[in-house]
Image (cartoon, rainbow, N blue to C red):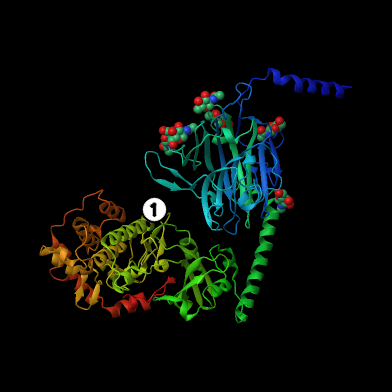
Amino acid sequence: MAGSYSLAFLLFCFVFSPVFAQPQPTSFILNGFNRSESKLTLEGGSIIRPSGALKLTNKSHDTIGHAFYSEPIQMLDKKSSPSPNASSFSTTFVFAIVPPSSGRGGHGLAFTLSPSKQFPGAAAGHYMGIFNSNTDALPSNHIFAVEFDTVNGFNDDSDSEGNHVGVNINSMYSKAMEPASYYLNNTERNEEIKLESGDPIHAWIEYDGSFVNVTISPLNRDKPSKPLISYPIGLTPFVEETMYVGFSASTGKMPSSHFILGWSFSTNGEASQLNISQLPVPPPNEKNGSSFDPLIIGLIVALSTVTVLLLGILIYFTLYKRNGKSEDLEDWELECPHRFRYKDLYAATRGFKQSEIIGVGGFGAVYKGVLPTTGTEVAVKKINRNSIQGPREFAAEIESLGRLRHKNLVNLQGWCKQKNDLLLIYDYIPNGSLHSLLFNQKQGFVLSWEQRFNIIKGIAAGLLYLHEEWELVVIHRDVKSSNVLIDAEMNARLGDFGLARLYDHGTDSHTTNIVGTVGYIAPEFARNGKASTSSDVFAYGVLLLEVVSGKKPVDSRNFFLVDWVIECHQMGQILDTTDPKLNSSYVIEEVKLVLLLGLLCSHPKPEVRPSMRKVVRYLNGDDQLPSIDNWDSFGARDGTYSKFLEIISFDSITKSYRSSSTGGITSNSICTGR
Ligand SMILES: *[C@@H]1O[C@H](CO)[C@@H](O)[C@H](O)[C@H]1NC(C)=O
Ligand SMILES: *[C@@H]1O[C@H](CO)[C@@H](O)[C@H](O)[C@H]1NC(C)=O
Ligand SMILES: *[C@@H]1O[C@H](CO)[C@@H](O)[C@H](O)[C@H]1NC(C)=O
Ligand SMILES: *[C@@H]1O[C@H](CO)[C@@H](O)[C@H](O)[C@H]1NC(C)=O
Ligand SMILES: *[C@@H]1O[C@H](CO)[C@@H](O)[C@H](O)[C@H]1NC(C)=O
Ligand SMILES: *[C@@H]1O[C@H](CO)[C@@H](O)[C@H](O)[C@H]1NC(C)=O
């Protein structure tokens, strides 16, 4: 009886409530989630942890999780107008993406606005549990999503690391996309945020009828005033009358755990601020989140340690007993996303055929190749591993260098180890090196001044990125014309990071052996073996003089380009140093600027040299080059530079390099610099 009564009551509500219902704005705030009275509909791998954290994906690979607010949200108010506009909305949430303990994971999570809480047939990985290859891009999807993704793939078809935020409509191809970062207030500088760090990240998404703004910041900071993405769009054509709002996440080959720690949402107004102190803390890693008691955890850890040790010993013996006919993989190698298969490289270079060699450097030969899987052209550098110590450290270095991306760098795509060889895979750059364009012209080809000036600016931009704009300071260590490649659009691409060692911002570079190329080595670097950003600036300065004059930095034991340019300048004839092949067709002001800047950069005193940021400003005419009156301080008169080169004769450099014992690549490019 009671049952039918309540049924009748429900029916009553169902039939009559719409008549009385005003289009109420929806708004809710969840400072953490409650398992027993969840306001969310969970699907796939999603669960609410006892701590109050919403965990969207479990530890399986290629899996999906959804969590949507159970009630629908009114996005179009059809009653008030026949052609209503999509309602504005604002949301803020805190999420954390915890990678697997083995290293990198995938994929990411997306704030999603969808006509349904179900996504039948949706795929994991790049599709993030929202679309699949058939439904992607269908206008009938009516789905709006903001993705927080850690893997590239949709917009550039690779599977490389891609720490990005994107605004998506009906498709995983983002309409707008930015590397995950946030702007510091009142500056144009943005700081990278690693989505996959496991640290909680605060996100805001706002739609005001004409813009979708997306902002992220580390949890402990205030909201940045400038959004990361401000994408102009009206959502009216894309939404339906009622929509569901929530999160979708997916794992890829490697599973990350995706957590939402708190969530606030509102239509027609700003979402209430989350109370950070009430949010659950994300587990620092999966172990802490487990519900086993510490004794059992201890036992498991002990047992696994023993197993790992035994396995390690087993692997060690198997690997070292075998002759290495097939690809020998050490376990750590499997975790490196930039590793290529030897088989593919062998096929790409037609078995490392002599005819595919496009260059020979200090390390060994460089082959041109076409990857069989993708048809991409690559340059493969084959380095004999005997000259390298600690392949594992090397791999770690390469893995992080592989993440450097700039239009003026030759991108390192990856690496591969085979017996005694290490192979580095770079983008293939068609026009060869700056050195060969300056000195071995084919059929009377001469780089014009305009091209040279553009190349000079490109190198500066690439170096600035290495020095100041990436998360770590990267010192190139071997800036020279043969390490600058020229692409199809005649832009400079700085290559060969083999010599670059990584330094954390702020820490002092430790002393290492001298590796560099005679003529480009800064005096203090030769003396104390400490490479620094200003020793790179020195080499850049020499390179500038080389590009203008078409002369090699050290052409014989008696010719030193820097000294010669200083002498000409002191005699008031600096334009005499320009390359005769230019035939006097150049912009005098630009040539003078570059020559004087070259001298300033190659000043013997490191403290006098400008930073690369300053160099870029000088080249763009944003700052005036300081005038250098006291040329004696260069030591040109008494030939300090040449003297210094004599003192650290070729022999002693080579010796100090040979006796080196630190890891990383040591190169003998000293002997083959020119
Ligand atoms: C979760 O909801 C239940 C049932 O309403 C309530 O008793 C409990 O106190 C809530 N837990 C928290 C942590 O708020
Ligand atoms: C993870 O979630 C999926 C559902 O999406 C389920 O099929 C799978 O069994 C789960 N794996 C584990 C380890 O719980
Ligand atoms: C929809 O938005 C447009 C442009 O902002 C405005 O001119 C129009 O009046 C709006 N329509 C309704 C029904 O609010
Ligand atoms: C979005 O950002 C733009 C600036 O890029 C700003 O003019 C606009 O007011 C912002 N809208 C919201 C809803 O924050
Ligand atoms: C940035 O500016 C906004 C708005 O002016 C302010 O609310 C916020 O506290 C500032 N953030 C920081 C980190 O100073
Ligand atoms: C946040 O939560 C704490 C602890 O529950 C409470 O003391 C504090 O007043 C709350 N702050 C706000 C702004 O609501």
Q: Residues within 10 Å of mark 1 (few under 14, many from 20)?
A: some
Of residue 412 and residue 45, the one placed in the foreground of this image is 412
Of residue 237 and residue 187, the one placed in the foreground of this image is 237
Of residue 327 and residue 80, the one placed in the foreground of this image is 80
Quarter of the image for the C terminus: give it: bottom left
Q: Is residue 354 left or right of residue 452?
A: right
Question: Measured from the top left, where is residue 608 in percent x and y?
Answer: 22, 58
Question: Measured from the top left, where is residue 414 in percent x and y?
Answer: 50, 65
Question: Measured from the top left, where is residue 420 in percent x and y?
Answer: 51, 78
- Disc 1 marks which residue? 469
The residue shown at (85%, 21%) is 5
Give the quadrant of residue 566. Answer: bottom left
Question: Measured from the top left, where is residue 545 in percent x and y?
Answer: 24, 65
Q: Is residue 182 left or right of residue 37?
A: left
**Would residue 367 be visible to someone looking at this image?**
yes
For residue 248, above or below residue 505: above
